[in-house]
Amino acid sequence: MRVLMKGTEAMAEAAIRAGCSAYFGYPITPQTELIHYMARRMPEAGGVFLQAESEVSVINMVYGAAAAGVRVMTSSSSPGVSLMQEGISYLVGAELPAVLINVMRGGPGLGNIQPSQSDYFQSTKGGGHGDYKLITFAPSSVSEAASMVYDAFDITEKYRHPVMILADGALGQIMEPVSLPEQGANKPSIKNWALTGAKGRPANKIFSFYLDPKGLEDHNLRLQEKFKNINDEIKYEEDISDDMEILVVAYGTVARILKNAVQKLRGEGRKIGIFRPISLWPFPESALKSASMKSKQVFVSEMSYGQMLEDVRRIVPDEIEIKFYGRAGGVVPSPNELYIKLKSLLEGGA
Amino acid sequence: MSNQILERPKSLTQKQFHYCPGCHHGIIHRLIAETIDEFDLRENTIIVQPVGCAVYIYEYFDTDVSEAAHGRAPAVATAIKRVSKGKFVLTYQGDGDLAAIGTAEIVHAAARGENICVFFVNNAIYGMTGGQMAPTTLPGMKTATTPLGRDVKKQGYPIKVSEMLAPFEGVSYIERVMVSSPKHVIKAKSAVRKAFKYQLQEKGFSLVEFLSACPTGWGMPPVDAAKWVEENMTKQFPLGVYKEVGLDD
């Protein structure tokens, strides 16, 4: 059954249907509907809802619930996610599964509450201290956001590594018809390592402290091996042909807006393809590389001044020209604005 | 034939403590472990450990243990207690951990009346990092970051944690004890037991504050350090019960 829901609410309901039984949050715009929804729904579903005193506490509550072996989630927006970085590093170090949602808003600092994509670096390049990257998925519709959250609970348990759903303020706020995933089809895994009391087994310990350098190096090597396996989770969407004039690369809300411009230009007979990374880390490197080699130019657009752009530059062969168009500060580029930009590139403009 | 009259509590592993001579952590660990055994809670206990000298608790206690980031143990314990029905959850924290970087977490856990026990070791100094001023450092006390002594005009006054948290309605029991002599160890043990009972009877947040010696950080021989707890710390931090809402029979 399809229901009309806001992005934030659809993600919350999808989490509950994935067996998420604990949610910790702190109010921050533009994702407050998610915490409101959880405040109402989580007790109904028999789970734990708690509004904490700060995002610092939130992420440590997530850590505690994950250590106790339950499916746990939090959501926040950019400044709040900055405060969580210490705790995210500890989740990684202690190999605890958790689903995190960042409904990105404009920064830096207090910035504003409008949609943005300027936390790409923070999410995909580390964020907290230590040698790690966060599994990051970026939805571009309410429906996709809901199924992504649902699947994220399996993925985070599979690798014992936190998963970030990197949405933006637009996606959080829009309402769309969504087919919600089924309750109970997705089951929490058995966690022999969780803290449940040392009954009939040796005591379990959750920690990331290795005083001995060799011990910490071994721990890191094991993590690095694990990270390689996460390449299995690479996801992207492409609509390309063999002889493109331009390949458009964008994620999330911007990819969605660009689809309109691409359709319009195709209607005018132009050969344009679109490539949308869905997993931002691990990034769909080989797929993007081969797609880009079928095009004369690559066009990257983001609601930032070029964060994913750095990955695209790293991946696309040097002989292919890369053009960039970014808006920031909470300004969402309009379909017509992107159409005009692409049109001018096709006509040899900068 | 000899009789064994004392043994290691079952809730401790065989691992030898790394603590300095005269440090009180070892005694406090033992009191908690003995009480876990007495209430037959070893298989039901989850300990949340701090960052600081007690960072190796996970090697010393034969119970489930979670490390927490510096100061965050009350938040971690809150979640563990709330998602784990019927488990016994305690945090073990020092003064830097609980009263400086983790002030927000301890205050809000107390205000929410989280049904956990907090064992707070106050030795008036950062031990592990090399003896810097703590929020509980006494006025005039010399530390690595107050080489001329804590000047209250510049560095402010010590935080009295037990007095600060006692007024919260969510708090069921708070007592300040010390372990500087056998007599006081026995009193401290009784406070630990009481804190356990408050959680077991679901009365809400309980905390025992231990005035504790750090001979290395203070630059004193162990015997002098224990004496210093009794003569100086108790003036700033008077012993006694600060909150007691009452237990069921």
Image (cartoon, rainbow, N blue to C red):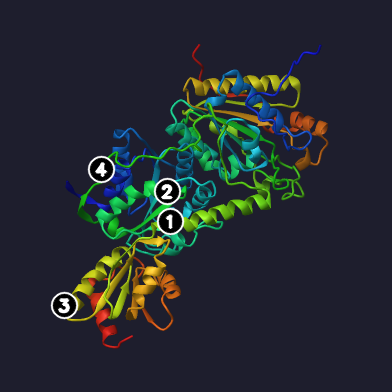
Q: Which residue is mark 1?
A: A135
Q: Residues within 10 Å of mark 2 (few under 14, many from 20)?
A: many
* Marks 2,1: beta carbons within 8 A: yes
Q: Residues within 10 Å of mark 3 (few under 14, many from 20)?
A: few
Q: Amino acid at mark 3?
A: Gly
- On screen, residue B248 versus residue B130, left or right, reads left
Residue B42 coordinates in the image, percent (x, y)? 57, 25
Q: Quadrant of residue A205?
A: top right
Q: Where residue A182 is drawn, which disc sits there?
A: 4
Q: Which residue is mark 3?
A: A267
- Mark closest to the chain's N terminus, 3 or 1: 1
Q: Residues within 10 Å of mark 4 (few under 14, many from 20)?
A: few
Residue A131 coordinates in the image, percent (x, y)? 55, 58
Q: Does dot 3 land on a helix, a strand or a loop?
A: helix
* Marks 4,1: beta carbons within 8 A: no
The chain identifier of the residue carrying mark 4 reads: A
Q: Where residue A156 is drawn, which disc sits there?
A: 2
Q: Residue A269 or A4: which is nearer the viewer?
A: A269
Spatial distance from mark 2 to mark 1, Cα to Cα?
A: 8 Å
Spatial distance from mark 3 to mark 2, Cα to Cα?
A: 42 Å
* Marks 4,3: beta carbons within 8 A: no
